[in-house]
Image: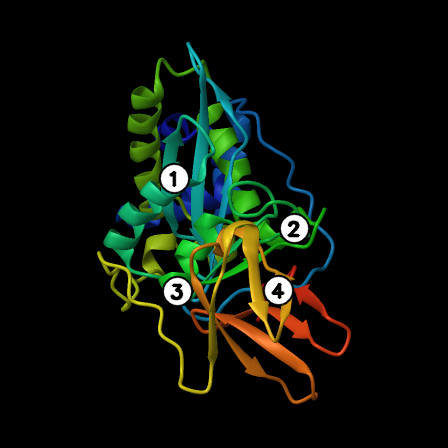
Amino acid sequence: MAVRAEHPCWGGRKIARRLADLGETEVPAASTVTAILRRHAVALGSTGAAGPFRRFERSSPNELWQMDFKGHVALARGRCHPLTVLDDCSRFNLCLAACGDEQGLTVQGHLRTTFRRYGLPHWIITDNGSPWGDGPQTPYTPLGVWLMRLGIGISHSRPYHPQTLGKDERFHRTLKAELLAGPPFDSLAHCQQTFDRWRVIYNCERPHQALDMAVPASRYRPSGRAFPETLPPIDYAPDHLVRRVQQQGWISFKGTAFKLPKAFAGYPVGLVPRTTDGTWSVIFASRCIARIDLRNGTAKTVTHVSEHL
């Protein structure tokens, strides 16, 4: 009952596992803990089993991070926009930041702090909204370009399919139930202090059902890819034809102007021929961002990359 009082949203399985983790020698079964809670007239959530499903997850930490905003939360004055970053394999929460807005520079600042602490992931998946995308048809923004320069792959969820970011969405449900359902926070600073305390509980104390009741911290390890304080130069192989992207995203190639996403304005891109005669790939920092077809003078910009690539 003391554990339940400290964590009012936890049920029998989590409490039983937490008691074991605390070193209790005679821990009752989870069903017994549930019966004790009911005997003390403690309200419990639904325990109905969901239908069969397939869970997709990466096999190692830092292969894929999921990132999103948890809507907005009312403060005594103003709003807080919680930024969340979750490791796909371990469910470890890497970033829980109380932001005053949802701007790209704000996200970039918190990602710098996260990268310095945990290293770089191989891939990050987000939704299609700002600041990581400008809608399903324009997935590249300055924030995404910065991530690509760090050697991080960036993907976007399928439009109108929030389940693609299912682990982070589930984290948002837990965050709302255990932390955000109470009275408004006084300020962003008060909100961040509360976030920091709860984040330790989530990562290191709260048993996670999807991890066989282990805690996320037991499955996570930092990345071996250190964050570079200075961005590496953008170099291309000798067989690449290099063009600098002009304002609004235009490049000139083979006497024709082609439109690329304007987020690449000011940067060099490399063009290499594809296997089909007359078609070329446009490369930025080792990733193909567009395809050019000289046979009809049009450019086809990559608009979506599967999260599983």
Instruction: Name the residue carrying label 3.
Output: 61
- Say if 251 sits above or below 189 in the image: below
Q: CA distance from mark 2 to mark 3?
A: 20 Å
Lower position in the chain sequence, tag 3 or tag 1: 3
Q: Quadrant of the N terminus?
A: top left
Instruction: Name the residue carrying label 2.
Output: 163
Mark 3, mark 1: which one is toward the viewer?
1
- Say if 209 sits above or below 220 in the image: above
Could you tell me the amino acid type at mark 1? Leu
Could you tell me the amino acid type at mark 4? Val
Mark 1, mark 2: which one is toward the viewer?
1
Residues at discs 3 and 1 in contact (Cβ within 8 Å): no
Q: CA distance from mark 1 to mark 2?
A: 27 Å
From the top left corner, tell me how far across and down residue 306 is, in percent: 62, 65
Instruction: Name the residue carrying label 1.
Output: 105
- Is residue 215 shown left or right of residue 272? left
Lower position in the chain sequence, tag 2 or tag 3: 3
Residue at the (44%, 33%) spot, across then down: 82
**Of helix, strand and loop, which one carries label 1?**
helix
